[in-house]
Image (cartoon, grey):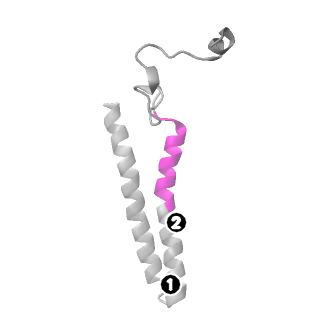
Amino acid sequence: MNQGEQRGRRRRPPGRQGGQGESEGDEPQGGPSPWSYAGIGFELVVPILLGVFAGNWLDSRWGTRPWLLVVGSLLGIVVGFYSFLRRVIPMGRADR
């Protein structure tokens, strides 16, 4: 390897050779990024919207208005809050 090739390479600090101790899920030292909070919001809203749209579609198909819309909405709310709490509770434990 010539000097030009050596200059272009970055050296890792000792103890972190070969990607040891690094993972894609590592959070920066300042805490979770704003994008992780946006992801939590999507995890809450998307199941609710899917439940509403699926319930409305099934109601129009089977003529059961408004019952499947109500069931789909409630199911979406339960799934959304379950997903939300599953992500938020560990964040609260990390702050302690």
| Bounds of the magenta segment | 32-46
Residue 50: give x, y in percent of width and height: 51, 67
Mark nearer the N terminus (1 vs 2): 2
- Kindly identify the amino acid type of the residue bearing the numbered disc 1: Asp
Report the front residue among 11 and 70. Answer: 11
Q: Which mark is residue 59?
A: 1
- Kindly identify the amino acid type of the residue bearing the numbered disc 2: Leu
Look at the image and say whether residue 38 sits in the magenta stretch.
yes
Q: Image height check: is 83 above or below 59?
A: above
Residue 5: give x, y in percent of width and height: 65, 15
Q: Main secondary structure of the magenta part?
A: helix
Residue 76: give x, y in percent of width and height: 43, 66
Assess disc 2: are there few (<14), some (14-19) or many (≥20) residues with their C-alpha within 10 Å of its C-alpha: some
Disc 1 from disc 2: Cα separation:
15 Å
Look at the image and say whether residue 40 sits in the magenta stretch.
yes
Extreme-bottom residue of the structure: 63
Q: Which mark is residue 49?
A: 2
Report the front residue among 81 and 58. Answer: 58
Say left or right for 42 vs 94: right
Q: Residue at x 69, y 12 (%)?
A: 4
Q: Which quarter of the rendered picture does the C terminus lie within?
A: top left
